[in-house]
Structure formats: structure tokens, C-alpha cells
Amino acid sequence: MVSGPTLQQQVQGKVDEIKQALTGVSEEQALKKPGTDEWCVKEILSHLTGEENAVMMYQLNRILDEETPTLTLTPGVSAYDSERENAPISQLLSNVESQYADLGKFFAGLNDEQLGRKAHIPFLKESPLGEYPTLGQWAMGIINFHLADHVQQIRTLAQQ
């Protein structure tokens, strides 16, 4: 099983990858959408710091407080609005760094028993994590699937 401090390091690593992927991205480039239903860089950064982040923290805490809580996921929720569209990349990135530093601290404070607590997440039934992941597995999913996917999106957009 993975440890809380290891999860914290992995979260920080993904944030570092986001920072690296944003190197040289202009404000204009950060607003370009590759397609009608696709997100621009600023929308991805907004998603990572929007209401979904607060919901994720709430759900992680539910795993600690309840016996196998059923959690719902709504993928693709965007917190993008005119305020975030007009915000500089540096501000959006700062929000990502702050919120994911908090997530890392949360993970770092978890012991093996807490990391082993389970949740019921029907959305993940067909995923490698399965329908009943442990908190540790769910944390790895956030890092290695969710964050990794958005890092790759930003890298792709930065090259366009």
C-alpha cells in the first residue's frame, strides 16, 4: 500500500508537471480551444480549482467519517467563467498550487488504516480501480488518472 507522504510527493510532482507544461504559454494561447467541445488551458486550470476540488475534499473526508460511503462523480464539470477567462495564467496556476498543496497535506496526514478505508463509487465500476476502491487507491486514481490526464491536455495545448 502507498503511504500518505508518498501521495503528497506524487501530487506535488503532478503540480510541477503542470507548471513545466505551462512554461512559455501565452495568455492568448491559453484561451485557444482546439475544438467546439474541448477545453482551453485556462478552462483546465479552472476545473482543477473549481467547485469540483471542494467536492473531492468533502468526499475524501466522507471516506474517513463513514463506513463505505457511496460517492457520486460527475466528470467534465467546468468552473470556467468570465472571471477565470480574464484571470492571468499565473493566478490560475497559483490557485492550482495552493489547492493541491492542501490535498497533499491531507494525504500526508493519513495512516495505513485510513488509506485502507473503502468507498463505493459506482462510476468507477469499469475502471482499473473498481467500484469499491480504498482511499489510497482513490488517491492514486486522482493523481495517476485525473491529474495525469490534465497534464497531458495542457502539454498538447501548449504545443499548438
Image (tube, rainbow, N blue to C red):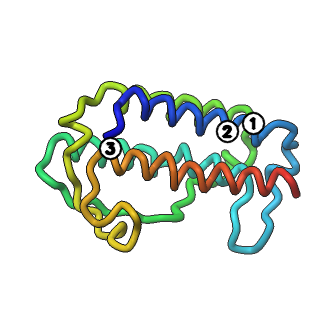
Q: Which residue is mark 2?
A: 17
- Residue 150 location (% of width, % of height): 62, 53
Which quadrant would the N terminus be assigned to in this image?
A: top left
Q: Position of residue 31 (x, y in %)?
A: 80, 54
Q: Is residue 93 above or below residue 143?
A: above
Seen as rendered, the residue at the extreme front is 1
Residue found 48% across the figure and 64% down from its top: 75
Residue bearing mark 1: 20
What is the spatial separation of the Cα atoms under label 3 and label 2, in whole angstroms? 22 Å
Q: Which mark is residue 136?
A: 3
N-terminal label among 1 and 3: 1
Quarter the C terminus occupies:
bottom right
Q: Is residue 49 left or right of residue 32?
A: left
- Packing grade of label 2 (10 A; few <14, some 14-19, many >=20) is some
Q: Name which of mark 3 and mark 2 comes first in the sequence.
A: 2
Q: Pick out the residue farthest to the left.
A: 67
